[in-house]
Image (tube, rainbow, N blue to C red):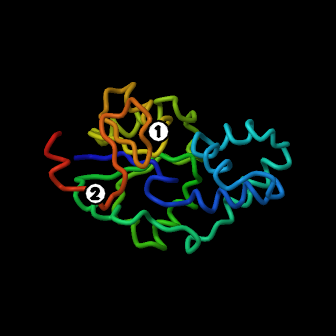
């Protein structure tokens, strides 16, 4: 089983930090739940929803890049899933160096064979170009993400999909927690 992973909100629990940053930029005029809900759609969606100025957008992105690896954590049990895969790859809009810093800090870098990152100049999701690139190189069996936008490109390419902590219709599988993962999950492929 070869798995394509989203990074933020799927492998690493970064949304508490992103929620805090967005709220700070908006002088805490929005609730934590409201910020989280909009960020889970996408950063661009949240920026538009809250009508951020260009200056505020730059500040959010800058603060997000400054996040220290020690300030975010992997989701409990994710390493068990990574261990059961034959190959793991990442597709993220996050910058490559930031991803590797976090993975190295948490001693997870050895799990991944390849990555397409935000600074690799592929079009943003839901465009399937980055997924196609990884699929052609690694014959992806399953794409796991936490947002609908993470599974749309996989579905376009005929790759099975799994939504993590999200029950939006359209995924082939759903995982509430990696602790719920059972190796027999892979037997259905």
Residue at image location 27% in from the left, 38% down from the top: 139
**Is there CB contact under 8 Å for labels 2 and 1?**
no
Query: Which of the 4 image quadrants contains residue 69?
Result: bottom right
Q: Residues within 10 Å of mark 1 (few under 14, many from 20)?
A: many
Marks 2 and 1, the one that precedes in the sequence: 1
Measured as percent of width and height from the top left, residue 127 is found at 51, 29
Q: Nearer the viewer, residue 173 or 136?
A: 173
- Quarter containing the C terminus: top left
Residue 20 lies left or right of residue 166; in this view the side is right
Counting every numbered tag in the picture gives 2
- Residue placed most toward the observer, 132 or 158: 158
Q: Residues within 10 Å of mark 2 (few under 14, many from 20)?
A: few
| Residue drawn where x is 38% and y is 32% of the image | 154
Q: x, y (%) of residue 118?
A: 58, 46
Q: Which mark is residue 132?
A: none
Task: Kindly identify the residue that appears in the image at 46 percent across and 46 percent down.
Answer: 146
Residue 134 drawn at (x, y percent): 38, 40
Kindly state the secondary structure of the residue where label 2 is placed: helix
Q: Which residue in the protein does label 1 denote? A: 150
Which residue is painted at 33% across and 58% down in the image? 178
Q: Position of residue 78 (x, y in %)?
A: 35, 61
Between marks 2 and 1 in the image, the one whose residue lies nearer the viewer: 2
- Give the quadrant of residue 153: top left
Helix or strand or loop: what does disc 1 sit on? helix
Q: CA distance from mark 2 to mark 1?
A: 21 Å
Report the residue marked by disc 2. 180
Q: Is residue 19 left or right of residue 88?
A: right
Between 174 and 6, the one nearer to me in the picture: 174
């Amino acid at each position: 089983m070869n798995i394509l992973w989203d990074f933020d909100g799927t492998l690493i629990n970064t949304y508490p930090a992103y929620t805090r940053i967005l709220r700070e930029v908006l002088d805490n005029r929005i609730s934590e739940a409201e910020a989280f809900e909009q960020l889970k759609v996408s950063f661009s969606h949240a920026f538009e929803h809250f009508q951020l100025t260009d200056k505020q957008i730059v500040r959010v992105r800058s603060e997000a890049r400054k996040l220290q690896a020690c300030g975010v954590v992997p989701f409990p049990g994710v390493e068990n899933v990574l261990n059961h895969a034959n190959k793991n790859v990442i597709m993220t809009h996050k910058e490559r160096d930031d991803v590797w810093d976090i993975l190295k800090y948490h001693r997870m870098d050895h799990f991944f064979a390849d990555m397409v990152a935000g600074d690799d100049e592929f079009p943003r999701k839901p465009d399937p170009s980055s997924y196609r690139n990884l699929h052609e190189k690694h014959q992806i069996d399953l794409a796991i993400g936490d947002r609908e936008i993470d599974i749309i490109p996989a579905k376009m390419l005929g790759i099975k999909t799994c939504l993590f902590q999200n029950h939006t219709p359209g995924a082939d599988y759903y995982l509430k927690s990696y602790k719920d993962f059972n190796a027999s999950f892979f037997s259905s492929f």
